Image: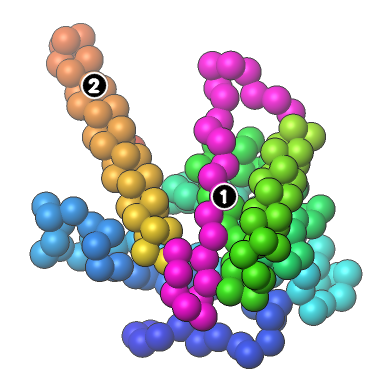
Amino acid sequence: RRGPAEVDSRAGWTMRLHFYWARPRGLLDEAHAGSQQGLVLVDTPGYGHAVAGAKELRHWRDLIEAYVSSSPSLRLALLLVDCSRGLCAADGRVLRLLRKRRVPTFAVLTKCDLLPPAELARSHAIVSAQVDEALRNGAAPSRADAAPAVPLLMLSSHFYSGIDGLWERLGETLHRQEAERLARLQQEAEEGEAAASPSPAPEVAPCS
């Protein structure tokens, strides 16, 4: 349905995966300005500090792990971290799963307007160290397959600070991925022509 997404006044009450089609202003380049190109935002249950029982938390964890492991369209993940709480054990598991699946990931400190500057700086340092520690606890990828680092961004929905920068980073990542995909398809096409194959090289396009 159209219109703004509904939200609950209580944190941690998302019960399932919610898919939202969006076409943010400024995210698309001029070549696609008049097209229907967009992206799908997937809102997942707040498994970390949610108000739920152990059974529901296990179900949400399994749901998220199944989605991350099987979705052919997942291009980028945002790990939202309450700046006053930091990472929990479940965050570490999700980070390691995303690293294993080679999904580019941003960690995002939320509610940054709630802390004074000195405490916010301390929270940023602590969460950054927690992210590094969580990834070190997982299986280390080989040098050839090493995944990129996880940037740590900060935002506040109350003052809208950091939101433009977040969209800018999302746009840069998605545009780079699309350029790499087109380059791979071009290379496959050229290799197919050079081999004089009777059938064209297969094209696998992401469903984004």
Q: Is residue 25 above or below residue 196?
A: below
Residue, x 75% and y 56% (percent of image)? 87
Q: Is residue 16 visible?
A: no
Dot 2: what SS?
helix
Point out residue 153 in the picture as x, y percentages from the top left corner: 53, 54
Q: Say if the magenta span includes residue 157.
A: yes
Residue under circle 1? Answer: 152
Badge 2: residue crowd in 10 Å (few <14, some 14–19, many ≥20): few
Cβ–Cβ below 8 Å for labels 1 and 2? no
Residue at image position (20%, 9%) is: 195
Secondary structure predominantly adopted by residues drawn in magenta? loop
Please name whichever residue, 28 or 188, is drawn nearer the observer in this view of the structure: 28
* Residue type beneath disc 2: Gln
Image position, residue 192 (x, y; %): 21, 17
Quadrant in the rendering for residue 53:
bottom right
Q: For the residues carrying marks 1 and 2, which lies nearer the camera in this image?
A: 1
Tag 2 or tag 1, which sits nearer the N-term?
A: 1
Q: Would residue 102 be visible to someone looking at this image?
A: yes
In the image, 72 versus 43, the foreground residue is 43
Q: Is residue 79 magenta?
A: no
The CA span between labels 1 and 2 is 34 Å
Residue 90 picture quarter:
bottom right
User: Residue 70 location, x and y as percent?
Assistant: 57, 48
Q: Amino acid at mark 1?
A: Leu
Residue 90 disc label: none
Q: Residues within 10 Å of mark 1 (few under 14, many from 20)?
A: some
Look at mark 2 in the image and give the residue it sits on: 187
List the single residue furthest toward the bottom.
Answer: 9
Q: Which residues are magenta?
A: 139-162
